[in-house]
Amino acid sequence: MEWFRFALSAALTLFGLFVLVSAVLGVFRFRYALSRIHAAALVDTLGILTMLCGLMVAQGFSDATWKMLAVVGFLWLTSPVASHLIGRLEVTVNDDLAEDMAVADPALVREEKESED
Amino acid sequence: MARLRDDWEHSPWRNFLRWLREGDDALDRAMIASLDAPAPELREETAPEAPALPAEEPLSEKRRRRLRAIYIALSVLLCVGIIGVLVRTAGSLPSFGGAENPANNEVSRRYIEQGLQETGAVNLVAGMILDYRAFDTLGESNVLFAAACAVMLLLRALGWREGGTELPGHEPHSDIILQKISMVLVPLILLYGMYVILNGHLSPGGGFSGGAVMGAGLILCANAFGIEVTRRFFTFRTFQLVSLFALSFYALSKAYSFFTGANGLHSFITAGTPGRIFSAGLIPYLNLAVGLVVCCTMYGLYGVFRRGDV
Amino acid sequence: MKDGMLAGAAGGAYQVLYEVTLGVIGVLLLLCLVRAIRGPRIADRVIAVNMMGTLVVIAICTLAFLLGEGYLVDIAMIYTMLSFLAVVLLTRIAMGVWRGKHHSGAQGV
């Protein structure tokens, strides 16, 4: 039983490490910031889920397990908002956006940059 | 650097000086003049201009160079003097790890061995800083309060941004996605901050860290919903009242050490069963007071630096 | 959270596994720092800082298991909150600075 628990936890942790390494690799290899957001979001969702699930399996049921579930829940709530805000920042600040990628709706980009709210 | 009031010329201090210099008749004349003076205008909604500084005559080149040389010489002298005093003091400290050093006496063993039964706090650090050494923590809270007062005096007195509601610079209006998430998150963060404050004597945490978390929750609220919504429950008046009462409660609980010495009085609030939340004597209440001061200070300093008013 | 978890037969194996994890996370943190320094635009830097925060949260939770101290996960929670708040404020200020530079005179103070 002990070894089964260890095998499960090790499988989850090693998969989580693979996800983390691919995310960092993606952040290095992609060329534009908007693509790097996709790579970075791997860490916040799948990476932390598998790593913390591996830790929870290793610990059994204790106070720390529920707290780790709360950490994962909080991160899942806030990480998409953070990515959205970073995307908005990139669209507003970057002046060469149209040269790097195909902009589907230039009017929206202009409105983002110039709205006087 | 406080702003002069509009009726400064007729304030009690100036009237007293005038009476001192010129006698009773002058005082009567000044009072009649103050009644006839026009009332100060109501402040308009648009921001007033910055007050104009008095014009100065430019210094001549030679005088400027001489002043600069004197300034540099005095600065170097002051720095060398302070460095000399510090080096001399550090040289006469006892050697590191010596047996008779105050850091190695029997006090730390007493804290570790009897801390739990004397203070009732499972978290020995909280027991030390809020029970054995509560007087030192009072000093720290006062330092925090003094820093907040100094920042408020300097930055709120700039006048033309008082009560400012506009966003500093040209910042974008708040995002709807951020607002929807903050409706869920801000109460959770404030609740978590209260948990960290109240559990200070049971697990690592306490007033300072829990107060910082609550301050961060308030900062998120101000960012997501705008300053008007946050001002519905946190104004400068709230900042003043909460800081004052929390710090006064702490001071009144522990300031008797001035008179009774380091051991303090025997507390009639019993230590209770260790591990329960209402144990450890006064420590939960002191944690609460410190946490509230830290929360108000964090949010107040953020507001003052960003838009000139809390 | 007891140390008995790590003292049993599988205890040594858990120790090795999670110490390797901590090492790998350390290396990944350094690489994210390189991206934060090199990234040509501010959005790249904010992405890297956000990712560093999440990696640190994973490292804290791993340490909480290795040392057997359950309350360290509270610190991980606080760190998550702080990194989210940092992203919110950084993007707001960066957008404000850019619009201030390009709209000077359009809006008063």
Image: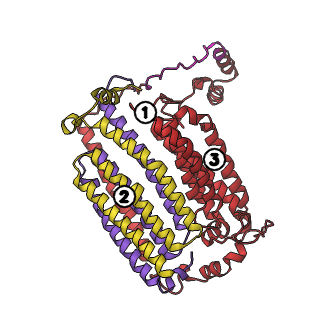
Chain colours: A yellow, B red, C purple
At 72% from the left and 77% from the top, the residue drawn is: B117
The x and y percentages for residue B36 are 64, 12
Magenta stretch contains residue C93: no
- Pointer 2 chain: C
Can you identify the residue that label 3 sits on? Answer: B243
Is residue B105 in view from this perspective? yes
Q: Amino acid at mark 1?
A: Pro
Q: Residues within 10 Å of mark 3 (few under 14, many from 20)?
A: many
Measured in 3D between alpha carbons, the distance from the residue under mark 3 to the one under mark 1, in whole angstroms, is 26 Å
Q: Amino acid at mark 3?
A: Ser
Can you identify the residue that label 1 sits on? Answer: B168
Residue A34 relative to residue B118: left or right: left
- Pointer 1 chain: B
The residue stretch that appears in magenta: B33-51
Say above or below: C13 vs B246: below
Measured in 3D between alpha carbons, the distance from the residue under mark 1 to the one under mark 2, in whole angstroms, is 29 Å
Q: Earlier in the sequence, mark 3 or mark 1?
A: 1
The x and y percentages for residue B164 are 50, 30
Between marks 3 and 1 in the image, the one whose residue lies nearer the viewer? 1
Quadrant placement of the C terminus of chain B: top right
Q: Amino acid at mark 2?
A: Met
Secondary structure mostly seen in the magenta stretch: loop
Cβ atoms at labels 1 and 2 below 8 Å apart? no
